[in-house]
Image (cartoon, helix red, strand yellow):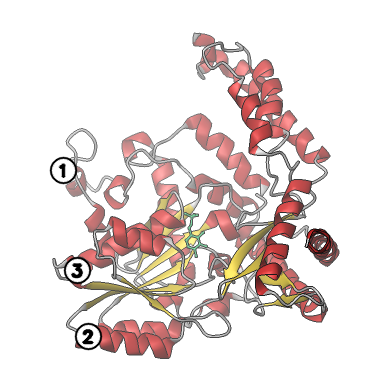
């Protein structure tokens, strides 16, 4: 069994094994015809059930053969130009290279004595990101597992900085389109059920700062504490960016922590054409960025940044075995002092390789391409009488619904759209997402693949219309 350990004696086997895995994936990428096969859980579950985990195959080739059946054949492929579903990006090769290296070396970024250079590389990327945001000389931060964790940590710091131990008094303000991790964080942080005040959005799905101001005033009048305002820079559904300068001014006025959730919109930090859309983000107390969304990085790659690095002390605990107090005096850089995690992947290496090979402009260009594509897609949808499109995109999502001729029942239109989404998924020809707008069923394209063309969008819209019409036709027959 020692032959499976990665070390000096097995370097050749490592090379062969990983190369074989890379070959399989490369073949897959070259031959996939659609983003999905349409396999159902009922079809796939028995295949996986049939695997006896207590009877190993012994060698990597056999396990890879089996993997074809249990995973690779039916995976959902984000690199395919007709994957238009969730906020998943195709990944860039330098980052995948980084991924292969980081798991083989297996550094753990909690302490210097488990990572050495890895810690300094992560710190440099944090500084780079904070610099792009404009957070100033005291800024700091740490890589996290994702936007959910980044938001949780940011709100933890905000809670600790709020200066009251009476958690029932704390309020968080975020738009009705903010990510559900805001609510989840509030619960995890022990705040009351009413802690999150949902601020309505305008017709462009951006937080109404006038209403925010009124809510803050009410909060103050009731003797409650405005703990944090969460501005979303790129809402998950619409890509809309809340009015950051107005929110920053209100945060200052009311002494609230300003958190910017830029999990999606962070790609703008690398854009030369659209960076201005984030103007005001430099006034934030904390920022969430998901490189695994708009920097074309493999999952996971995310960070939380703060204006004042000293606030990260709220996540600092010392363990004699790991990061004893003396290491602080000795100025040993232990990232665990800033993190909610202990053992932690060297995800930063992926972004490092990306910036060293492509540069930030390279990433920004890719993100600009998908934002341009969204504008073209919007024009297509707006001109298409079969569709109603919700809002002109600031980033790269399009929310729309099929509206049949001669059908007036809103519930029937909802069902036709939902059916079309499911039928499309089952066909494997394309993957689109769905969401609700004012209680009605809508469909969504999240465009993160620069290889997707307007022709792809047009073709998928035809497919959706076909499925919806088929549903309505069948339903008329049954009626
Ligand atoms: C995706 C997303 C999150 C959550 O990020 P994960 O990486 O999925 O945990 C938070 N906020 C916004 C606005 C998002 O789009």
Q: Mark 1 CB in 8 Å range of ligand 1? A: no
Left or right, 394 with respect to 233, comes to right
Between 165 and 13, the one lying in front of the other is 165
Left or right, 213 with respect to 25, comes to left
Between 319 and 39, the one lying in front of the other is 39
Identify the residue shown where x is 74% and y is 29%.
23
Question: On the image, numbered disc 3 is attached to which residue?
Answer: 168
Q: Where is residue 189 drawn, in percent x and y?
A: 26, 58
Question: Mark 1 and mark 3 in contact (Cβ < 8 Å)?
Answer: no
Kindly give the residue lying farthest to the top in the view shown.
1
Question: On the image, numbered disc 2 is attached to which residue?
Answer: 220
The answer for how far apart the CA atoms under marks 3 and 1 are is: 37 Å
Indicate which disc, 3 or 2, sits on the residue closer to the N terminus: 3
Q: From the viewer's perspective, is the residue at label 3 or at label 1 nearer?
A: 3
* Disc sitting over residue 16 in the figure: none
Question: Mark 2 and mark 3 in contact (Cβ < 8 Å)?
Answer: no
């Amino acid at each position: 069994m020692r032959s499976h350990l990665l070390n000096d004696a097995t370097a050749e086997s490592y090379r062969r094994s990983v190369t074989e895995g890379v070959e399989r994936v490369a073949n897959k990428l070259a031959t996939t015809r659609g983003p999905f096969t349409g396999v159902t859980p009922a079809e796939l579950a028995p295949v996986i059930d049939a695997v006896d985990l207590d009877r190993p195959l012994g060698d990597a080739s056999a396990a890879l053969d089996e993997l074809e059946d249990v995973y690779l054949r039916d995976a959902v492929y984000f690199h395919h130009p007709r994957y238009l579903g969730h906020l998943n990006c195709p990944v860039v090769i330098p980052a995948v290279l980084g991924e292969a290296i980081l798991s083989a070396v297996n550094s753990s970024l909690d302490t210097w004595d488990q990572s050495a250079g890895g810690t300094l590389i992560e710190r440099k990327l944090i500084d780079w990101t904070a610099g792009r945001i404009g957070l100033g000389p005291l800024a700091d931060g740490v890589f996290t597992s994702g936007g959910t964790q980044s938001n949780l940590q940011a709100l933890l710091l905000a809670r600790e900085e709020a200066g009251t131990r009476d958690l029932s008094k704390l309020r968080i303000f975020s738009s009705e389109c903010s990510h559900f991790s805001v609510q989840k964080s509030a619960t995890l942080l022990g705040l009351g059920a009413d802690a999150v005040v949902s601020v309505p959005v305008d017709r462009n799905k951006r937080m109404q700062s006038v209403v925010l101001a009124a809510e803050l005033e009410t909060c103050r009048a009731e003797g409650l504490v405005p703990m944090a305002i969460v501005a979303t820079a790129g809402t998950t559904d619409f890509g809309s960016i809340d009015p950051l300068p107005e929110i920053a001014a209100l945060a200052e006025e009311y002494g609230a922590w300003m958190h910017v959730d830029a999990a999606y919109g962070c790609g703008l930090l690398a854009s030369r054409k659209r960076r201005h859309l984030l103007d005001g983000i430099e006034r934030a107390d904390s920022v969430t960025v998901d490189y695994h969304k708009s920097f074309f990085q493999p999952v996971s790659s995310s960070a939380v940044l703060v204006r004042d690095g000293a606030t990260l002390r709220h996540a600092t605990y010392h363990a004699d075995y790991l990061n004893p107090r003396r290491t602080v005096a000795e100025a040993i850089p232990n990232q665990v002092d800033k993190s909610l995690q202990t053992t932690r992947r060297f995800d930063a290496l992926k972004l490092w390789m990306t910036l060293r090979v492509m540069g930030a402009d390279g990433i920004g260009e890719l993100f600009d391409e998908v934002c341009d594509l969204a504008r073209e897609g919007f024009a297509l949808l707006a001109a298409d009488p079969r569709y109603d499109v919700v809002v002109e995109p600031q980033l790269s999502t399009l929310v729309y619904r099929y509206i049949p001729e001669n059908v007036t029942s809103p519930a029937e239109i909802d069902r036709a759209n939902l059916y079309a989404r499911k039928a499309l998924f089952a066909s494997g020809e394309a993957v689109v997402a769905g969401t609700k707008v004012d209680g009605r069923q809508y469909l969504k394209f999240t465009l993160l693949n620069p290889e997707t063309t307007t022709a792809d969008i047009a073709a998928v819209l035809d497919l959706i219309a076909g499925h919806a019409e088929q549903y309505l036709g069948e339903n008329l027959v049954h009626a």
